[in-house]
Image (cartoon, rainbow, N blue to C red):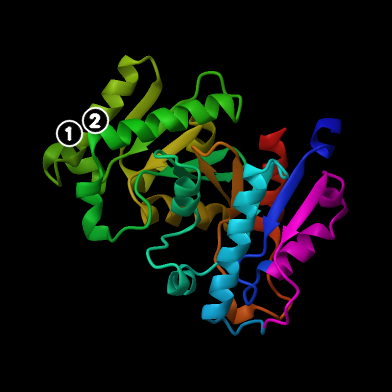
């Protein structure tokens, strides 16, 4: 515990008109969170109108993020927990903004990053992120999927201390392509990336049909599941664990965690927002930065 108490965790408010300020305040009032270590809250004390987002609140949320980046680079904080922001509103002042993951990767000049979602023993990675569904197939390549597998394997070993990770890989198509009857991506791309990883002595399995891969027993059988696209992986993991789910950006030179939900402008200021995801994000940031 003494090692953890020496850590300083930065927490950005996210969009100040959303639920970020509320869930952060609720989390930090908990005795089990207070005792973890030190916190730096990155935001401002302006009188924002909760539930009334604007271009200004979007710009402010980006400024908080930029401050967090500078604090990491200056080694004034050891990890970063980010509150939810609105990509749409941030893009009004920062055209081309696609989200925390891509923005942080660019800020630290990192080419290979992934979104890892954690809930207890369950860990799910999405091989493609925020792209239209009709672009997913062309975005999945042997090289790209191999990089995702390799990064996931490395992170499980180094960050989560799993000596010999077992990783399951989803197919893209229904029934993992049915041997080519419902698409060729499994044969032409996914299987080749899996085979290449197995040749490097990694315990990688698949491609599996996604509709049966997320049954509870597989949370014990595999250390991580790699899904091919956003909703394929996040639909089931959020259905199973939404209140406590945490998003971790892997591949960065520091620990960044966040809630697995959005700004929830509709309930901001009503004191009904559930802080569970923020609580778990803070706990995981301390644990992984220990």
- Label 2's element? helix
Q: Which residue is denoted by mark 1 in the rendering? A: 187
Q: Is residue 135 left or right of residue 223?
A: left
Q: Is residue 189 left or right of residue 213?
A: left
Quarter of image, res 274: bottom right
Q: Relative to 87, does residue 208 appear above or below in the rendering?
A: above
- Label 1's element? helix
Q: Spot the residue most to the left.
A: 181
Residue 6 percent across, percent down from the top left: 82, 37
Residue 242 percent across, percent down from the top left: 57, 57
Q: Relative to 42, does residue 170 appear above or below in the rendering?
A: above
For the C terminus, the image quarter is top right
Q: Which residue is denoted by mark 2 in the rendering? A: 191
Quarter of image, res 230: bottom left
Residue 80 percent across, percent down from the top left: 65, 49
| Real-space Cα separation, disc 2 to disc 1, in angstroms | 5 Å
Whether the residues at callouts 2 and 1 have beta carbons within 8 Å, the answer is yes
For the N terminus, the image quarter is top right
Specify the segment rendered in magenta. 21-48
Picture residue at 31% right of the left edge, 36% below the top: 145
Tell me, yes or no, if residue 112 can be seen here. Answer: yes
| Label 1 packing within 10 angstroms: few (<14), some (14-19), many (20+) | some
| Label 2 packing within 10 angstroms: few (<14), some (14-19), many (20+) | some
Picture residue at 38% right of the left edge, 31% below the top: 149
Picture residue at 58% right of the left edge, 76% below the top: 57
Q: Is residue 258 magenta?
A: no
| Front residue (pair 62, 85) | 62
Tell me, yes or no, if residue 244 can be seen here. Answer: no
Q: Is residue 28 magenta?
A: yes
């Amino acid at each position: 515990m003494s090692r953890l108490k020496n850590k300083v965790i930065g927490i950005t408010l996210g969009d100040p008109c959303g639920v970020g300020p509320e869930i952060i305040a609720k989390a930090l009032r908990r005795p089990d969170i207070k005792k973890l270590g030190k916190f730096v809250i990155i935001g401002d004390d302006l009188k924002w109108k909760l539930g009334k987002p604007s271009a200004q609140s979007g710009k402010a949320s980006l400024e908080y993020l930029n401050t967090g980046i500078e604090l990491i680079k200056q080694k004034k904080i050891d990890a970063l927990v980010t509150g939810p922001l609105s990509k749409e509103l941030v893009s009004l002042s920062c055209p081309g903004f696609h989200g925390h993951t891509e923005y942080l990767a660019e800020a630290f000049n990192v080419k290979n990053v992934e979104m890892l979602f954690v809930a207890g023993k369950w860990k799910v990675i999405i091989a493609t992120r925020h792209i239209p569904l009709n672009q997913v197939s062309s975005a999945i390549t042997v090289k790209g999927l191999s990089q995702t597998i390799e990064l996931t394997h490395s992170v499980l070993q180094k960050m989560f201390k799993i000596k010999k990770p077992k990783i399951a890989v989803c197919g893209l198509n229904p029934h993992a392509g049915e041997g080519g009857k419902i698409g060729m991506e499994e044969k032409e791309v996914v299987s080749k990336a899996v085979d290449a990883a197995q040749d490097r002595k990694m315990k990688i399995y698949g491609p599996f049909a996604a509709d049966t891969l997320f049954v509870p027993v597989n949370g014990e059988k595999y250390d991580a599941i790699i899904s091919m696209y956003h909703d394929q992986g996040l639909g089931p993991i959020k259905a199973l664990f939404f209140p406590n789910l945490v998003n971790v950006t892997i591949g960065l030179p520091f620990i960044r965690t966040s809630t697995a939900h959005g700004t929830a402008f509709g309930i901001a200021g009503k004191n009904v927002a559930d802080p569970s995801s923020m609580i778990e994000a803070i706990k995981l940031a301390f644990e992984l930065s220990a």
